[in-house]
Amino acid sequence: MSKVGEKHTVVIGGGIVGACTALELIRAGQKVTIVDLGEPGGRQAASYGHGCWISPASVVPMSLPGLWKQVPSYLMNPKGPLVIRWRHFPTLLPWLVRFLLAGASVRKVESTAQALSWLLRDSPERHQVLSEKLGMPDLIRRDGLLYAYPDRRAFEREALAWHLRRITGLRWRELDRTALALREPGLDEHYSFGILAEDGAHCIDPGAYVARIAKAALADGAQLVRARVSEFVFEDDRLSGVRTDQGTIACSRAVVAAGAWSKALARCAGDRIPLESERGYHGVVSLERGGPRHPVMPSDGKMANTPTTQGLRLSGQVELASIDAPPNWRRVDILLEHARKTYPALAKLKDIEIDRWMGHRPSTPDGLPVIGRSSRSPDVFYAFGHGHVGFASGPITGSIVAQQITGNDQPFNIRPYSPRRFRLGRYEP
Ligand SMILES: Cc1cc2nc3c(=O)[nH]c(=O)nc-3n(C[C@H](O)[C@H](O)[C@H](O)COP(=O)(O)OP(=O)(O)OC[C@H]3O[C@@H](n4cnc5c(N)ncnc54)[C@H](O)[C@@H]3O)c2cc1C
């Protein structure tokens, strides 16, 4: 039963962002329906298969000064950590140009890092509190995140990335060969230098965690509808419903939290957002002994190796192609090949069973999410485009959107995430 004066909000998408938004709204006394074409936290969602890192260090955008020089290798080297599929290059070109421009100067990437740090700096604590409230504190581990390098020079070659982390307040500890081997005895000996980002955390079962967040919202009175949303129904500029393949759902507000699929919905609400899928992959292998005890990012593999409930999750790769293109499972073989060089115990295993997954990072060219009201209607809100950091920043995004909807003050300036920042020659938050 609706409360007097209560508005009904449809949250489109039950990934980490939609689930957290729904939970915040229902706890603020709103009437909420989550609409997703799959199960919340199911395999179709990026929130299921990511690298599990909850990292205040993830403030470094993908586009950095000088990256343009590497574009030819992204097109030519099918084994690199970032590839652009030739066939999709012409369609992706406008996004790529904006992407390269976003990282054209140190000043630009410093301001992007700052805006990302507002979303990430307390992300481990937010996830810890949330998991405790859900009665699943074991899913979040706050024991740091490790970057492994062959030597100190390899670390120094990433000076800009660590500069961005330093100016956003990250603390870390340097590990020499002995300290590194103590932290991660299973690492190959070609790694002799490490950085331990002590504030970092990880999740050991993201799919179960997101499903649990959605379940908590349902237990508090939210509804779940399995359907695909196709458009909005407006009366003048006011929202009266969302149209789905199962019929129209009457509502007075909607939140677009459909991850990489949000672009068409934003278009229906008056905004052309340059959103593309940065496709990524994971492989899960079972490694009982000699595997990592904690999450590790080996600098030569550019991937996250994270112990999870299901096994060791090897995740990474950035593949730019259309959202509908079929997966290229050789990308998981590349991840496995790197992991064999990282862990001698894995290199010794024959006939490895591996669970392969491909998913879509919802990525804007400037590496910042889109959070704010739509241009067409004050009743449609956006919460998508979190690229590489959506899992970590899901809870704070849910809280920002709920505060916008309920008319409360924001904890910090959210203007950098404005949907209108992509308009040429004009900037209205
Ligand atoms: C390989 C890889 C590694 C990553 N590693 C990390 C990491 O370590 N840390 C981190 O913070 N982030 C990481 N990310 C990024 C992170 O996974 C995403 O940013 C985040 O999960 C996005 O969450 P979301 O809720 O916006 O979207 P999703 O999780 O994709 O959820 C969107 C939901 O919307 C639904 N949907 C879509 N269209 C419709 C529609 N029309 N109608 C109804 N429902 C719809 C989908 O079914 C889906 O359930 C990684 C991503 C990848 C791919």
Image (cartoon, rainbow, N blue to C red):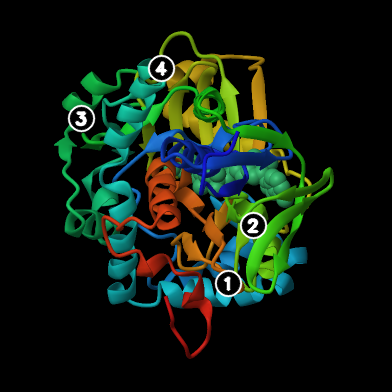
Say whether disc 1 or disc 3 marks the residue closer to the N-terminus. 1
Would the CB of label 2 be found within 8 Å of ligand 1?
yes
**Real-space Cα separation, disc 1 to disc 4, in angstroms:** 40 Å
- Which is in the foreground here, disc 2 or disc 1? 2
| Cβ atoms at labels 1 and 4 below 8 Å apart | no
Q: Which residue is mark 3?
A: 177
Say whether disc 3 or disc 4 marks the residue closer to the N-terminus. 4
> Which amino acid type is shown beneath numbered disc 2?
Ser
Say whether disc 1 or disc 4 marks the residue closer to the N-terminus. 1
- Which is in the foreground here, disc 3 or disc 4? 4
Determine the secondary structure under disc 2.
helix
Q: Image point 29% across, 49% down: which residue?
A: 154
Which residue is at the front of the view, 215 or 332?
Answer: 215
Residue 228 in the image, given as x and y percentages of width and height: 77, 46
Q: Is residue 29 left or right of residue 358?
A: left
- Locate the N terminus by quadrant: top right
Q: Quadrant of residue 336?
A: top right
**Real-space Cα separation, disc 2 to disc 1, in angstroms:** 19 Å
> Which amino acid type is shown beneath numbered disc 4?
Met
Residue 387 in the image, given as x and y percentages of width and height: 50, 53
Residue 96 shows which numbered tag? 1
Which residue is at the front of the view, 86 or 383?
Answer: 383
Residue 262 shows which numbered tag? 2
Depicted 62 relative to depicted 300: above or below: below
- Which is in the foreground here, disc 1 or disc 3? 1
